[in-house]
Image: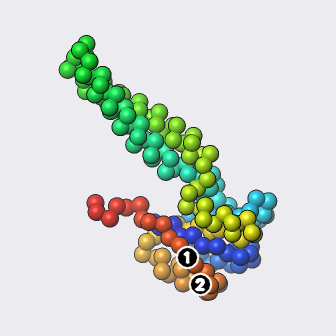
Amino acid sequence: MRRIYFLVPDITITRKIVDDLLLARVEEKHIHVIAKRGTPLEDLPEANLLQKSDFIPAVEQGLALGGATGLLAGLVAIALPPASTVIAGGVLLATTLAGAGVGSWLGGMVGMNVGNRRTKEFEDAIEAGELLVLADVPADRVMEIETRIKQHLPQVEVEQTEPRVPAFP
């Protein structure tokens, strides 16, 4: 899945585009609209906290950093003289899991209070009254969806995020 971002000038065109995406079999749970605070979106699928904040990337970063810190703490604990080699694996596992848990929890707390870094570049346009539409579509359908969007709004600039799958597995 790839997330595409595009700005739409008003709610009427946004409604037409969302309806067209639904007809193209893009599920409503994969379409998110971000508007200026106080803008009535009526029946449009509004973006929730996961789309408006950096929660998911922050949890992932916290998990990695906390796990690495826990592993390092476990290695230090094993190096101390009273530690037995019999319990070394348990100590490493426990400290790594504890570090990963604490790191992801703290990362999530921080991420919920930080706006989505990817949507920051659109903030001025959103405050000016435009609507930002985010759509998660399969990678092989991106061009088809872009064509459908451009039928309603020919001058639109569709931006994409990088795929979540690494280039070299």
Q: Residue at x 41, y 32 (%)?
A: 99
Residue 149 relative to residue 140: left or right:
right
**Residue 83 visible at all:** yes
Name the residue beneath numbered marker 1: 158
Q: Residue at x 58, y 78 (%)?
A: 157
Percent position (x, y) of residue 150?
Answer: 59, 84
Q: Mark 1 vs mark 2: give the one in front.
A: 1
Q: Residue 150, which numbered label?
A: 2
Image coords of residue 65 (percent x, y) = 41, 40
Between 96 and 73, the residue placed more toward the observer is 73
| Displayed quadrant of residue 158 | bottom right
Residue 95 falls left or right of residue 144: left
Give the percent coordinates (x, y) of residue 128: 74, 69
Q: Earlier in the sequence, mark 1 or mark 2?
A: 2
Q: Are marks 1 and 2 in contact (CB under 8 Å)?
A: yes
Q: Residue at x 25, y 13 (%)?
A: 82
Badge 1, how many Cα within 10 Å: few under 14, some, many 20+?
A: some
- The kind of residue tagged 2 is Lys
| 75 sits to left or right of 113 | left
Q: Amino acid at mark 1?
A: Val
Q: Quadrant of residue 74?
A: top left
SS label for mark 1: loop
SS for tag 2? helix
Instruction: Say which of 80 and 50 sits in front.
Output: 80
Mark 1 vs mark 2, CA separation in Å: 9 Å
